[in-house]
Image (cartoon, rainbow, N blue to C red):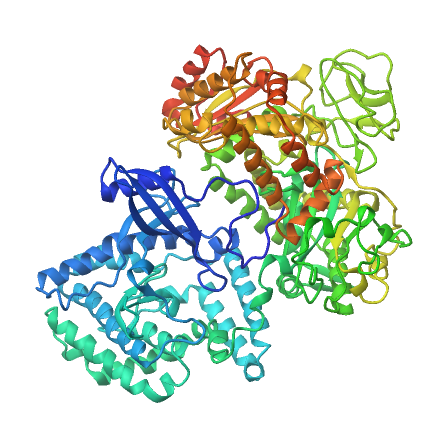
Amino acid sequence: MPEADYIENKPPETETEELLTKWDLEQLLSAKLGPDTRVDSIATKQLTQPGENYGSNILSVEVTLLPDYKKLDLVAKLVPLSPFLREIFNCGVTVRTEIDVYTKVSKEFQEIQRENNISKKDYLDLFPRCYGARVSRNEDVGQLADEGAVILLENLTPLGYRCGDRITGVDLEHSEMVASRIAKFHATSIAIKIKKPLTFRNVIMKVCEDKTKPSEDMEIGMNKMKKALIKQLEVFPECVKHMNRILEGFEKDMAQFRDGNRAKEKPKEPFATMCHDDFWTNNMMFKYDKSGETTSPVDYKLIDFQMPAYGSPMKDFIYFLFTSTEEGVVVDHYDHLIQIYHKNFTSWLEKLGVNTEPFSFEKLQEEIETVAPKLFVHLITMITNVITRGRDKPPDMANWGKDSFNEMFVLMNTSGVSTTLRPYLPLFLESLLELPILRGDTLVPYEQVVAQLETDTIAVSASIGLENSSRFHCGAFSHTAVLMLQLEPAKYSLCNCLQLEPAKYSLCNCLQLEPAKYSLCNCLSSWSQPSTVCVIVCPAGASQLEPAKYSRCVTWIRELLYQTQFTVERLRILAAKIANDVAQVKRKGNKVVTDLMKGLVYNQGSLDGSLERHSREIGVLMTHGRYRGRGEELGGLNGSWVLERQGRGIGGLNGSWTLERQGRGIGGSEWFMGAREAEERTVTTTHSNHYSSSMLRQHKFLTSLLERLESPALSQKVLQELEEVRAVLTQPANIVVHLAADVDKLPGDPADPWAQMLPSGVNPKRIKLAVTPDWALLTPPCEQKNGSCVVGLGCIESSFLCQTTGCLRDFSDPDLAPLLVFLQYLTQLEGPMWRQIRGQGLSYGYSIVPRPNEGLLYLALYRSTNCVGAYKEARNILECQLSPGAQWEVSLFESARSSLIFEVIEREKNVGDMVTQSLLSYFKAVEHDYNRRLVQLIAGVTVEDLKRVGPQYVARLFDPIHSQTTVVCHPSKVDEIAAGFKELGRELSVYPSLEDSLLSHW
């Protein structure tokens, strides 16, 4: 599903690998502690709190080392989990910079003190000890930092250090220590500049370089931050009267950023030095006497060097004074603190052998007068901390969590989009949010649209498929396009329902709630809505919804879908942005190997989505081999249905398929369906969205499209084709809206705004949710050829493998729970695969996962150092466990069930999750208490069940006839891996590069 609030920085709620593992720590610590470093165990805890550090995800890590079980207290800094935060904070650069500060700059600070015989008593030690760092798991030290970046620092908290209170600020005594230490920090950099200019240029200036480049995404991100700040300031009357000046300052700063004037502005000498550039309470730590007899600080450390810059030292000190001190400190002691700074600054320069004559107090005063006005925008971002000094906390912080937001989903069936137009879908969906809108006779510019949309919503997104969708990768149920609007509590709230148990709220037609407390909408059967609207109800007592806000959100849906205007200029920019992103995605081996597999199993012969299941009305099971209807188990009528080929050949682009009452099969494969409802219909063949949205096909398509946009005649054709895509997707019969609300708190008649959703002249349709299961888009088994392959990718060192075979296609299949336990037994921590694959260092990650929506069982090896060895070991483990005399360890069996139950429960840990699960239940054709029932089924699984389902579903995973394999590795290993798999009985086609592979072919 689309990502949540853009200011969130917390672990994602989808399937992800561990943030930090024992293997990671051993690799990182070995450089500091020696190559024989071994980790027995780790314990991690989230340290990042809302509002404290958006530029990093910070964990405390307690490491137990072997063989003496010594404890090591560390802090791990990782990149933010939110893509928005990674973009706005330019983490690819900032993490690399911070690593250089801790590993290179700190050494130069030590060296110049040693060269000038600084005594131990006077020694300046401002940096926490660094135990190891990396910019990527891909071992390419020259690249920008990515999601695998990490910095390991000593944990200062057990040593008696702690940050000051970021809300109340620090007192005079703490401020005096800060003044003396930051003065010496600045002076040390100046001493290196004067006495060791080559070192200064190669080390200090390297970390101070301004590597940020203006971009459209970054400017949008800055506008989002401006919007969030304005909302905070509007709460305080003392700020409202200055709002115009604040906005003017923001616009001026953004203009400088766009024009590149920041980088052009040269700092004044001789005071120019290395600045921390984010110097406030949260980025410094004070040490206190462990006895607790005094609150006076005894030492001080600087942390969080993500944005060092070459500039005036007063940028740091003035910023600290006005953001991080208690009320009254600056008013009463400003001159005193400036004098302390200057005294320590000059005395430290003298100790380092630098002439202090150019650094007089008068010159420092001139520096302050020059620099202070330029800090306006930077200081404004901290104004809520200053305004709320003496108050408990900023008034809106309680509502910053995701649980406070509500999401509206517009679900569009893409089945009717033709093969020719299907490649437009990614561009169409992305452009919807960044186009001008026609309101009456007025064309509203896209910049104004983006700004207004951000004002009315927390987040908006458009994607192909549900759950885990991203650019070039479709989510589950990939024939459904999703437009998501996330709304603020004041605009559309899930209200006070945040702590409800799962059983206490559900979708309207399956509620089991007390009528006196809850309002049942009966699916809004009396509404004249343009599409089905599913409503979740919440308990009474929630805040009243503003009528204008509610109506405005519905209006946004109409405007985005029907009134956005495609222009050549905007399409050129958006298409280029998407195409340029291919280069980054191609560097990710895990993405590429998955894309290759999708290219194998989703093909040109895929069935179009006219083969549908109606949620909660039709249950579907399709199998290949021995065929029979499963009507009774699926809640349908007895008997079965067959999907037959009409015309010549099988799997071509031409011809059709017809769903009929079971009778004679006409050649090829027979596919059966058990159903409660069924109707005869024709199903045409087309590309799947997986096929047409893959990275290389999109790159080729968009490159060609950009060329067409250069021609006036051809560009008009492009606009026409995009309008054709819109016409298909926005037909009332193709749209379903899913929303959540307290029905009792909706203003007026909740149906009224929806009556205006469709443009005039477009008639509404009352429909049920139409779902195209992903397995209906697979190439039929009888048409699949062995496309297993190994592809060379020069930017990776490790190998990645993906292997699939046919599996369950029904989320209600009674064998699903035993199958999940069987796989959990093999893959769990300390399980067979963990011990024999991870434990032997053959592969960093591994998984075996069934995906019923695709009807496939996936085996994956992630960052494998010995792909053939890891694959062989996985096969041996499976064969051993599938043998008639296989042993099942009781402890592993129990832990498999309990850990699996925990994973299922985690799907519903908050209201946002419940909304998502409610939506998915329609697509999965299951009841809304599905997860509760699944937990019960898992708890009832026995070892005998495992012995039964393993041979039935897992055995053919390693059968070359019934499975497909894709491998991505470094080009130097391609032939070696192909030869290794050949010895194991599996032929792999060899592609030296990605451009030679099947992904580059239409």
Q: Is residue 925 visible?
A: yes
Q: Is residue 824 left or right of residue 123?
A: right
Residue 444, picture quadrant: bottom right
Q: Residue furthest right?
A: 526
Residue situated in front as seen by the camera: 545 or 521: 521
**Total label count?**
0
Q: Quadrant location of residue 637?
A: top right
Above or below, 880 relative to 291: above
**Residue nearest the viewer, comparing 375 with 71:** 71
Q: Is residue 224 left or right of residue 973?
A: right
Q: Residue at x 65, y 61 (%)?
A: 457
Res 567 visible: no
Q: Tell me the quadrant of the picture where the C terminus can be found.
A: top right
Residue most extreme to the bottom: 332
Tell which residue pokes out farthest to the front in this image. Answer: 890
Depicted 322 relative to depicted 860: above or below:
below
Residue placed most toward the observer, 218 or 736: 736
Of 789 and 306, which appears nearest the observer? 306
Whole-percent x and y of residue 516?
83, 60
Q: Position of residue 339 (x, y in %)?
A: 24, 83
Q: Residue visible at 41% across and 14% down?
A: 979
When the figure is inspected, residue 874 is found, relative to residue 495, above or below; the finding is above
